[in-house]
Amino acid sequence: MQNLSGKTAFITGGASGIGLAMADAFAERGMRLVLADVNAAALDKAAARFRGRGTDVLTMTLDVTDRPALAEAARKVEAFGKLHVVCANAGIPPSGAKVAETEPEKWDRIIGINLTGVYNTVHYMLPLLRAHGEGGHVVITSSMAGAVAASPIGDYVVAKYGAVGFGEVMAWELKPENIGVSILLPGTVATNLNAREDSALSAGMDAGAVGRRVVEAMEKDELYIFTHADYRPLVQARCDAVMAAFGTSAQPDFREPDQVVAMMCQNAYPPKR
Ligand SMILES: NC(=O)c1ccc[n+]([C@@H]2O[C@H](COP(=O)([O-])OP(=O)(O)OC[C@H]3O[C@@H](n4cnc5c(N)ncnc54)[C@H](O)[C@@H]3O)[C@@H](O)[C@H]2O)c1
């Protein structure tokens, strides 16, 4: 999407870290902001900072697991102005357990915020992107954990792989409507998510650099946004293992009906139209 100035972006988890950094990068381009977050105090602080810089900003305290709150948020955004960008970014860290041993309540919470929260956000905001027919863009914050299965962050991996699938399907579905999709897959970023003195993860990339990459990717309509080159060999190894398994285990003498293959090929990402 081009010509961002004057357009409005809705960002969940917009009061801190990567969400706030995206907001900063959007404000640099002259965009208007709607920041949604569970942290009311952080929202107030962010809003004061943006207003001080002359950016038009609306904040709303909401939890992305709360569907009625998102429906109400959509009504408020509609009154604020035409919406062009939706960033489903809010997320929480992994529980740290081995995947099958994750406590049920923690499993539900991580999947509920990091995956279903993405669906909830896009489900309620997409009609506003469609309403004006001018096109738009959706940014899904996944993680390097959405492309590499690591332990002991399995609950987080499952949610972030799911977010990648959601974004890939949506990229295909929304292409004819001129609504782009970008999936952000960062490695470690220095935000509150990792801010523990005992953790090597409290270092990490500056969130500002990630926010600026997101804007560039939106402008170039890039589907995958990778920020950390270090992980390339891990992603390559996974792709190689998948392709090697095709070579050894796919049955050459079984033929799927042609129309089934054609349907999958026509409807799968990357788009062929
Ligand atoms: N920091 C990293 O290293 C890293 C790496 C890869 C992906 N990510 C992802 O980036 C996204 C943003 O995380 P961050 O690193 O900026 O962390 P952060 O903690 O600084 O920001 C997350 C924001 O989301 C808000 N939030 C949490 N639960 C919410 C909910 N239920 N509803 C609404 N808002 C909620 C928090 O209040 C916070 O302001 C997350 O999806 C995270 O999984 C982070």
Image: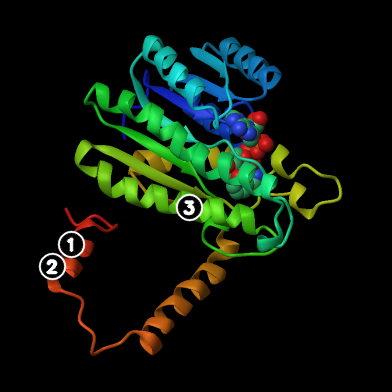
Question: How far apart in space, not on screen, are marks 3 and 1 (Cα)?
Answer: 22 Å
> In this picture, is 94 found above or below 40?
below
Q: Which residue was labeled with disc 2?
A: 259
* Callout 3–callout 1 Cβ contact below 8 Å: no
Q: Which residue was labeled with disc 3?
A: 162
- Residue positioned most to the right: 198
What kind of residue is marked 1?
A: Met
Secondary element under disc 1, as helix, strand or loop, is: helix
Q: Quadrant of residue 132?
A: top left
Q: Is residue 266 left or right of residue 221?
A: left
> In this picture, is 237 found above or below 205?
below
Q: Judge whether residue 109 can be spotted in this image.
A: yes
The residue sitting at 39% across, 37% down in the picture is: 138
* Callout 1–callout 2 Cβ contact below 8 Å: yes
User: In x, y percent, where is residue 157?
Assistant: 58, 57
Q: Which residue was labeled with disc 1?
A: 263
Disc 1 C-beta below 8 A from ligand 1: no
> In this picture, is 226 found above or below 115?
below
Q: Residues within 10 Å of mark 2 (few under 14, many from 20)?
A: few
Q: Judge whether residue 209 can be spotted in this image.
A: no
Q: Which image quadrant shows ligand 1?
A: top right
The residue sitting at 36% across, 43% down in the picture is: 181
Secondary element under disc 2, as helix, strand or loop, is: helix
The residue sitting at 60% across, 10% down in the picture is: 52
Q: Is residue 207 left or right of residue 83?
A: right
Residue 8's label in the rendered image is none
Disc 3 C-beta below 8 A from ligand 1: no
What kind of residue is marked 2?
A: Gln
